Image: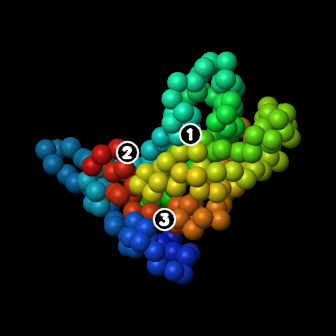
């Protein structure tokens, strides 16, 4: 019995709750032509096509800024995709974080997002980023990417280090929708369709 996994924490029904999983769709094995396929009964995708990762190369405000002079952009790595810290003159300071979302049938999709932080805190973050003190790092910021199918760009979010070998995780949000994305179980067909097709 896994009914507890489908609990919806918010007591108030909102339009976006239609995306939250309401029921368990069991998986089945389909047999044909002597071969065995593990196929999802809910959406028809191969079962191994469910636990996806997507990594946003740039924060949306940086993309929206258009052409940026190289001298105005500081990256922690050789390029944006491999960087975990970014500061762009007149745009903002950004930290990478993971946003894992629990999907029906025990799947998890993980979004590698940028979090906009207070530029005044960037020095403090930089100072500990590659040091043992990193494990105690916790920050408040705003989601720097639009994450489909919800949107969520600009939602306030707290991030914290859970694993010293990993970038921080989104832990909670004072915005109801992002908090629901963090804490609830979502219909995997609807979530996967946003980036990975049907
Ligand atoms: Zn499925």
Camera-side residue of 73 and 163:
73
Q: Earlier in the sequence, mark 1 or mark 3?
A: 1
**Pointer 1 residue:** 61
Looking at the image, residue 106 sits to the left or right of residue 198; the answer is right
Q: Residues within 10 Å of mark 1 (few under 14, many from 20)?
A: some
The tag on residue 36 is none
In the foreground, 143 or 132: 143
Q: How much space separates mark 1 and mark 3, taking CA atoms? A: 29 Å
Q: Nearer the viewer, mark 1 or mark 3?
A: 1
Residue corresponding to mark 3: 185
Residue 23, percent from left and from top: 38, 73
Q: Is residue 156 above or below residue 24?
A: above
Residue at x-position 47% and y-position 54%: 151
Q: Position of residue 192 (x, y in %)?
A: 37, 51
Name above or below for residue 82 compared with residue 152: above
Residue occupying the point 58% across, 45% down: 144
């Amino acid at each position: 019995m896994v009914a507890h996994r489908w609990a919806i924490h918010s007591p108030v029904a909102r339009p976006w709750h239609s995306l939250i999983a309401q029921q368990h769709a069991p998986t089945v094995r389909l047999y044909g032509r002597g071969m065995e396929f593990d196929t999802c009964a809910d959406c028809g995708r191969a079962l191994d096509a469910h636990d996806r990762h997507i990594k946003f190369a740039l924060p949306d405000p940086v993309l929206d800024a258009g052409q940026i002079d190289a001298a105005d952009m500081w990256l922690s790595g050789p390029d944006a995709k491999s960087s975990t810290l970014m500061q762009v003159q007149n745009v903002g300071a950004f930290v990478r974080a993971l946003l894992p979302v629990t999907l029906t049938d025990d799947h998890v999709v993980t979004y590698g997002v940028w979090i906009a932080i207070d530029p005044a805190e960037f020095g403090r973050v930089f100072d500990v980023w590659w040091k043992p003190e990193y494990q105690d790092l916790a920050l408040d910021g705003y989601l720097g990417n639009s994450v489909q199918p919800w949107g969520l760009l600009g939602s306030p979010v707290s991030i914290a280090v859970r694993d010293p070998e990993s970038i921080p995780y989104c832990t909670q949000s004072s915005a109801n929708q992002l908090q629901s994305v963090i804490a609830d179980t979502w219909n995997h067909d609807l979530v996967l369709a946003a980036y990975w097709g049907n």
